[in-house]
Amino acid sequence: MNFTHNTVTVTTAGVRVRVTASKTPVKWVRFKAVAVNAGAVYVGDSAVASTTGWTMYDADLATGEGLILNPGAYGGTLNLADFYVDSAQNGDKVEYFAIVSRGG
């Protein structure tokens, strides 16, 4: 089983950052806010912004929440390169861990 993980930093709030530039088909992925973030972070497609998308806060860490996507349960994959993050504050971060599809 192959996996990938990384931390994505939004240097400038309101300027979305692509999760990865490489096509990476994944069967499972979890996105989480980093505990020291100053504000909300957002995960989405190329239309994500500093006010829209799947919203996460560092407070979500206490409940173990975040965004979990499991296309492998349905026989599919998602491309990590299709995901972007943005934030309400400069320098905030999102971590991800993903199970990479074989052959991907």
Image (cartoon, rainbow, N blue to C red):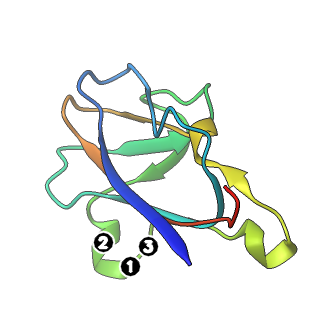
Residue assigned mark 1: 64
Disc marking residue 65? 3
The answer to whether residue 41 of the structure is visible from this angle is: yes
**Is residue 95 in view?**
no
Q: Label 2's element?
A: helix
Residue 103 tag number: none
Q: Residue at x 19, y 61 (%)?
A: 35
Q: Position of residue 20 (x, y in %)?
A: 47, 38
- The answer to whether the residues at label 3 and label 2 have Cβ atoms under 8 Å apart is yes
Mark 1 vs 3: CB contact within 8 A: yes
Q: Quadrant of the C terminus?
A: bottom right
Q: Are marks 1 and 2 in contact (CB under 8 Å)?
A: yes
Q: Tell me where residue 14 appears, x and y as whole percent.
A: 37, 21
Quarter of image, res 73: bottom right
Q: Is residue 38 above or below residue 46?
A: below
Q: Is residue 64 above or below residue 103?
A: below
- Is the residue marked by circle 1 packed among few (<14), some (14-19), or many (20+) residues within 10 Å? few
Q: Amino acid at mark 1?
A: Gly
* Distance between mark 3 and mark 2 Cα atoms: 6 Å
Relative side of 74 to 6, left or right? right
Q: Nearer the viewer, residue 29 or 13?
A: 29
Which residue bears the numbered disc 2? 61
Q: Residues within 10 Å of mark 2 (few under 14, many from 20)?
A: some
Image-based side of 102 in relation to 95, left or right: right
